């Protein structure tokens, strides 16, 4: 009877221990959710701090509320679609307005495709901006590219209808980059009305532009000159400031265009553009990791992701990778541990899911996304790379094995595993590390020359810490 009671007691204790463990896990999840809510609340507070008091003021019941946001870097475009002075005799006003509407509709299509924001249309003047409401680093390139497409469309439009030298519609454009303040209004449809020196300067540049000309400020020029063929135009007097230099945009540089007009970007443009756009993707993913990674990830944290992104670029250039290969490597490195926001085990697969969902929005092709996902999966232990890019990924992911800071970095991985009950004592961990490093090899010539010697030293250092 006593034996039976003891067995029942043991089973009861086991059930209670299991329930206690489940409660502890539930508490951890609740704490994690609470921490995320606190961080989200802080971000919302920061956002509201940027909103002017006047913008938040309610003007009375039934009247709309307005608010304003500051954008430190936007690019503003003014396009004057002038043509009324060149109307042919007998052309009625309704036909003129119909044609103007067609032109405006096509301009809006271009603006939407390049993820810009239409601000307003005043008569035959069209105003839009890049970099709002979603901030991005590529907005000067986007806006200049939109201007080239607008000009090409109008030229083609007139050629089809009236032939060469008989067109009535002419276009002149002014562009300037800088900070703007956007007044936001509307509920169902959000509207933006931007103000500031940047807007005024873009308008003045359009004013001194000429038919068929795209005129940009020196600020915009410095941000786009790598992609576009530009010629110096002159200076614009600016009150209380130095004269503003201006440049004419002829079109895309030949190496970045499919056609001689310099209108249609080619693959080289897309890759070069992607390397710049990567900064925006990186900011999004690092913010996600900062917000959503579990607190016990002492090794697989934001710093590790940044380290791997840096290392794949370093080894990639040393191994003579192309621009596209560097872009694929950096993107894969950025996403390779993003799956930890979903689960610890099999995080590589979850990282590919996040990449597949996000990357089409940044114009990655299906083939590029597949290659990136293969690179992410290649980091799954034990490493078994099958090509140069996978070699670089695996070497970059385990770069710390041959670095001078190996011991403290290794200890963070131990603490991470211990927090999940996946590892016993530090002494046990050191034994595992010696075995792992002894059987590990770097795959690229660059990594072997940089890290292999130090890696052998790490084995000796760990062995000295092991106690029987």
Image (cartoon, rainbow, N blue to C red):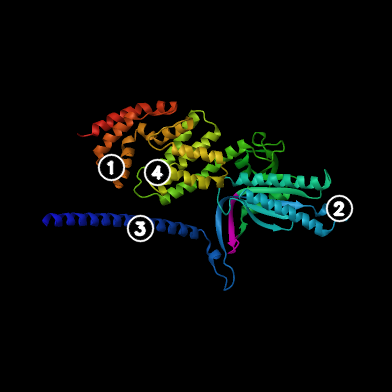
- Can residue 240 be seen here? no
Which residue: 46% across, 33% down?
390
Q: x, y percentage for residue 88?
A: 86, 52
Label 1, label 3: how many angstroms apart (C-alpha)?
24 Å
Whichever of labels 2 and 3 marks the residue nearer the N terminus, that label is 3
Q: Residue furthest front?
A: 1
Whichever of labels 1 and 2 marks the residue nearer the N terminus, that label is 2
Q: x, y percentage for residue 415?
A: 30, 44
Front tag of 1 and 4: 4
Q: Which residue is mark 4?
A: 346
Whichever of labels 2 and 4 marks the residue nearer the N terminus, that label is 2
Q: Which residue is mark 2?
A: 88
Label 1, label 2: how many angstroms apart (C-alpha)?
84 Å
Check disc 4 and report its element: helix, strand or loop: loop
Check disc 1 and report its element: helix, strand or loop: loop
Check disc 3 and report its element: helix, strand or loop: helix
Local packing at callout 4 (Cα closer than 10 Å; few below 14, some 14-19, many 20+) is few
What range is drawn magenta here? 178-190
Which residue: 77% across, 47% down?
157
């Amino acid at each position: 009877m006593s034996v039976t009671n003891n067995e029942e007691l043991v089973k009861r204790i086991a059930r209670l221990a299991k329930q206690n463990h489940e409660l502890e896990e539930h508490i951890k999840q609740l704490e994690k959710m609470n921490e995320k809510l606190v961080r989200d609340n802080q971000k919302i507070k920061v956002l509201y701090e940027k909103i002017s008091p006047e913008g938040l003021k309610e003007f009375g019941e039934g009247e709309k509320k307005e608010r304003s946001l500051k954008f430190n870097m936007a690019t503003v475009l003014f396009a004057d679609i002038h043509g009324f002075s060149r109307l042919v005799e007998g052309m009625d006003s309704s036909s003129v307005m119909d044609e103007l509407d067609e032109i405006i509709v096509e301009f809006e299509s271009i603006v939407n495709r390049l993820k810009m924001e239409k601000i307003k249309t005043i008569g035959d003047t069209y105003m839009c901006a890049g970099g709002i409401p979603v901030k991005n680093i590529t907005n000067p390139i986007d806006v200049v590219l939109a201007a080239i497409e607008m000009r090409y469309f109008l030229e083609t439009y007139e050629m089809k209808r009236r032939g060469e030298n008989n067109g009535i519609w002419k276009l002149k454009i002014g562009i300037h980059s800088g900070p703007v303040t956007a007044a936001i209004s509307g509920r169902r449809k959000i509207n933006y009305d931007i103000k500031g020196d940047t807007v005024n300067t873009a308008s003045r540049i359009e004013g001194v532009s000429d038919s068929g000309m795209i005129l940009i400020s020196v600020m915009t020029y410095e941000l786009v000159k790598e992609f576009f063929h530009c010629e110096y135009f002159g200076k614009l007097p600016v009150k209380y400031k130095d004269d503003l230099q201006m440049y004419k945009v002829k079109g895309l540089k030949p190496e970045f265009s499919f056609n001689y007009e310099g209108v249609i970007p080619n693959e080289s443009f897309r890759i070069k553009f992607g390397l710049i756009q990567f900064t925006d993707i990186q900011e999004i993913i690092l913010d996600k990791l900062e917000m959503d990674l579990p607190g016990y990830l002492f090794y697989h944290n934001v710093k590790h992701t940044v380290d791997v992104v840096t290392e794949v670029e370093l080894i990639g250039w040393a191994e003579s990778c192309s621009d596209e290969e560097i872009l694929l490597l950096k993107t894969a490195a950025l996403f390779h541990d993003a799956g930890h926001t979903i689960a610890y085990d099999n995080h590589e697969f979850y990282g590919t899911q996040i990449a597949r969902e996000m990357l089409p929005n940044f114009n990655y092709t299906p083939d590029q996304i597949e290659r990136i996902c293969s690179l992410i999966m290649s980091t799954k232990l034990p490493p078994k790379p099958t090509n140069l890019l996978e070699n670089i990924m695996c070497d970059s992911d385990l770069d710390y094995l041959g670095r001078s800071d190996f011991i403290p970095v290794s200890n963070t991985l131990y603490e991470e595993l211990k927090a999940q009950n996946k590892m016993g004592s530090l002494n046990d961990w050191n034994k595992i590390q010696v075995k792992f490093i002894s059987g590990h090899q770097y795959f690229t010539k660059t990594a072997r020359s940089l890290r292999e010697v130090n890696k052998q030293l790490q084995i000796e250092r760990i062995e000295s810490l092991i106690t029987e």
